[in-house]
Amino acid sequence: MVILGADLHKRTHTIVAVDEAGRRLAETTIPATAEGHLALRRWAARFGERRWALEDCRHLSRRLEVDLLSAGEAVVRVPPKLMAGVHRSVREPGKSDPIDALAVARAALADPDLPVATLDGPERELRLLVDHRDDLVAERTRDVARLRWHLLDLGIEEPAARSLDRLRVQDALAELLAVAPGTTGRIARTLLTRIAAASTAIRALDAEVGELAAALAPSLLALPGCGPLTAAKIVGECAGISRFRSKEAFARHTGTAPVPVWSGNVSRHRLSRGGNRQLNLALHRIAITQMRIDERGRAYIDRRRAAGDTKTEAIRALRRRISDEVYRRMRHDERLRATPRATLAAAA
């Protein structure tokens, strides 16, 4: 088996081939175009049994990944969090595209449970929508902070915290700013217009994301503590739960699998800093919500605390259990979506 690690950039891709012992066999750099990808597959044809390892860089890796998968190649995604440890262990000093590609290949060798890549499906559409919504929320938050400083300068009373996304508050503030003098007043009116437009777009995205999440993950939405946005984040970041060979591999990807740190007679585990932090945060939200509203979640936390865990340790344990439940429910939802397609294919 030969692993082909890729360091990806907007205009060029550098690929390093290594054997099962991590020894460098060959390397090449190609333009990041369809013609370059075709030339890359011809170059790689010399290696019989091969697997591609691409650092999971969202838009940077997508075009090469799609071309490789369409050609029947085996591709795995290497989380960027894995790269730091590999870079530290590489004896070759410095930083270059071949060194980075070699690190990607060796990271793929070191972790046999990496998620495989698949062709785009509805999960990518959901991920794009959620990412766009996150960007709009971040931009609105910055505009709200700027607007509050200008209101202070104009002597206008600030609205309550986290209220500027409401139409009623925006309308009332627009009336006050309509007569605000000078450049400060003009900038404040512009900011309020942008905040109102962003709020309208965010509400529309919330409705669209909720509909898609309900269609793709009804079982996941039924999990206590998991709302539409959290379900959408999980579905989009997973990009197909069948990419993970087991619930344990999924837990490692989400960073919920504890890391053993013990010596002698002391046996304990610590928090994993690896994995997909977006997924980890989504699972943490579910855990915190279950502590508030779900009797089973509260009971589990109480049992862990009674056994000697701290509150933080108990939440980590709950998050690990939620990871397994999310995996099970997403597998169930994926099977349900596949059943109608299989029925139609049999009928044809």
Image: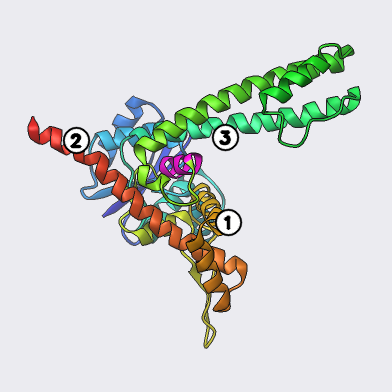
Is residue 145 at all visible to an observer of this figure? Answer: yes
Q: On the rendered image, what quadrant is the C terminus found in?
A: top left
Q: Which residues are magenta?
A: 228-237
Mark 2: which secondary structure? Answer: helix
- State yes or no: discs 3 and 1 in contact (Cβ < 8 Å): no
Mark 3: which secondary structure? Answer: helix
Q: CA distance from mark 2 to mark 3?
A: 33 Å
At 37% from the left and 58% from the top, the residue drawn is 249
| Mark 1 vs mark 2: in front | 1
> Residue under circle 1?
292
Q: Which of the two labelled residues, at mark 3 and mark 1, occupies the earlier sequence position?
A: 3
At 35% from the left and 35% from the top, the residue drawn is 215
Residue 48 located left or right of residue 256: left
Q: CA distance from mark 1 to mark 2?
A: 39 Å
At 54% from the left and 55% from the top, the residue drawn is 293
Is residue 29 at all visible to an observer of this figure? Answer: no
Amino acid tagged 1: Arg
Residue 150 located left or right of residue 343: right
Residue 211 located left or right of residue 190: left
Amino acid tagged 2: Arg
Q: Which mark is residue 33?
A: none
Amino acid tagged 3: Asp
Point out residue 78 in the picture as x, y percentages from the top left corner.
Answer: 42, 49
| Mark 3 vs mark 1: in front | 1
> Residue under circle 2?
341
Mark 1: which secondary structure? Answer: helix
